[in-house]
Amino acid sequence: MNTTPPALLLLPSDRAEQTVIRLPLPIVAGNRDYQQREDELRRMDELLTHSGVEAACVAHFIEAAFAAAGVEAKPLSDRRRESIQRHARQALRCTVARILSNESHRSFSGHLAESALLQWFCGIRFDGVIRVPSKSTLQRMEAEVPAQTLQDLNVLMLRRSTTMDDAGASVLGLA
């Protein structure tokens, strides 16, 4: 019988929490629409990272993996935990980006394959070959993201949209 408290089994190790260093985004000059899209995704990245929404989603995925393994399960290995964390972040970010783009799963999958900006936001790893989720995988990912997480993100966005900075401007850059 495993004597480690379940809460300790869910804690990520230092190795599993390391972030991946990515190449910088290409500089796109003279295209205002692209710049606005980049700004929007950077703000969303900030919100997901600093608000705790992304961490809550990752915790949900780890808890689900632990529950699926059963009561007698050993602690998750660093490799398995890292894989779950990467999948959870990618599922959340692909879902958010697809909703923001208002595209079908099929269209978004193609758009994701073409766009370095979306690949950066969604956490697509580049190891010589770009591998993006298919339409079906995107649908499964979206179903895995807890509805409560998306609701929390929506509430956070609504609150932030009415919050003003010291200069009296919207913190999200809204008019």
Image: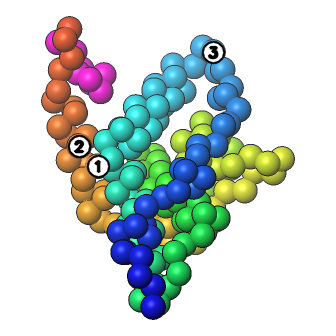
Q: Magenta segment, which residues?
A: 168-175
Label 1 is placed on what type of residue?
A: Leu
- Residue 80 location (% of width, % of height): 60, 69
Res 10 → quadrant: bottom left
Q: What is the secondary structure assignment of the residue under circle 3?
A: loop
Give 103 or 95, whichever is nearer the viewer: 95
Q: Amino acid at mark 2?
A: Leu
Secondary structure at badge 2 equals helix
Quadrant in which the N terminus is drawn: bottom left
At 38% from the left and 43% from the top, the residue drawn is 48
Residue bearing the label numbered 1: 153
Horizontal and vertical percent position of residue 4: 42, 76
Disc 1 and disc 2: Cα gap in Å? 5 Å
Mark sitting earlier along the chain (1/3) = 3
- The residue carrying mark 3 is 29
**Who's the residue at 19% across and 11% down the image?**
166
